[in-house]
Image (cartoon, rainbow, N blue to C red):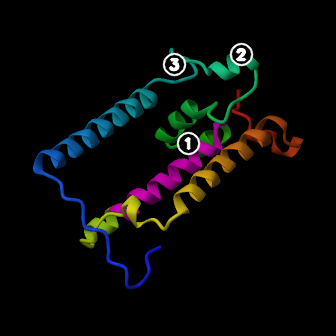
Amino acid sequence: MLAPDAPAAPPIERSDADARRIVSGRGALLAAGAAGCLAVGLLDPSTAPFPACPWRALTGIDCPGCGATRALHALLRGDVATAVDHNVLLVALVVVAAVGVVVAATRRAARRPPLRVADVPSGAGIAAALGGATIVAAFWLLRVAGPESMRWLASGT
C-alpha cells in the first residue's frame, strides 16, 4: 500500500487503436461465451455429444468440474435445484460472477472508473488466488473422500 505522501502512479495512456482492440477482444469473448451458453442451453449434455471428463474416464472419480456442463444446462433452464445437485461449485461461481457484473454496472452507471488490478492492495490478489484454490481443493476432497453426509456434492451421475 502506498504511503499517504507517496505520489500516485501515472495513468496508463492508451491509443484509440488499443481501446478498439480491447473492446473487440471483449466482444469476441462475450460472443464465444454466449454461443457456448446457447449450445449448452439448447442441447441436453446428458444425451448430446459433449466431451466427457478425462479425469473421470481415467479414474472413475469426480473432478471439481464434473457435472458443470449439466449444472449450466439446468441453470439456463431455470432449474437451480438440479444445477446444485450436479455441481454446487459452478452455481456458487455463477453467483460470484453475477455480483461482479452488478458491481461493474453500478460503477459505470455512477460514472466511477472500473476497478483495476492496480487498485487491489499488495498481496490481496495472491491471497484471493490461494483462497480460491483452497475452496476448490476442499470441495474436491469433500466430494470424493468426505463423510457420507457430504456425498450430495457428487456430480449426480
- Residue 13, percent from left and from top: 19, 58
**Image quarter (top left, top right, bottom left or bottom right) of the C terminus:** top right
Point out which mark residue 58 bears: 2
Q: Judge whether residue 91 is colored magenta.
A: yes
Identify the mark nearer the N-term, 2 or 3. Answer: 3
- Identity of the residue furthest to the right in this view: 147
- Residue 146, percent from left and from top: 84, 41
- Identity of the residue furthest to the bottom in this view: 5
Looking at the rendering, the stretch of residues picked out in magenta corresponds to: 86-104
Give the secondary structure at mark 3.
Answer: loop
Label 1, residues with CA under 10 Å away: few <14, some 14-19, many ≥20: few
Relative height, residue 68 to residue 147 (above, below): above
> Where is residue 57, by image quadrant?
top right
In three-dimensional space, the C-alpha distance between marks 3 and 1, rounded to whole angstroms, equals 20 Å
Identify the mark nearer the N-term, 3 or 1. Answer: 3
Give the side of residue 15 with respect to residue 48, left or right: left
Q: Which residue is mark 1?
A: 79
Identify the mark nearer the N-term, 2 or 1. Answer: 2
> Where is residue 41, by image quadrant?
top left
Point out which mark residue 50 bears: 3
Residue in front for this viewpoint, 41 or 155: 155
Give the amino acid type for the residue marked by disc 2 in the picture. Answer: Leu
Give the amino acid type for the residue marked by disc 3 in the picture. Answer: Phe
Kindly identify the residue that appears in the image at 41 percent across and 34 percent down. 37
Give the side of residue 132 with respect to residue 109, left or right: right
Q: Judge whether residue 95 is colored magenta.
A: yes
Q: Are marks 2 and 3 in contact (CB under 8 Å)?
A: no
Kindly identify the residue that appears in the image at 32 percent across and 63 percent down. 114
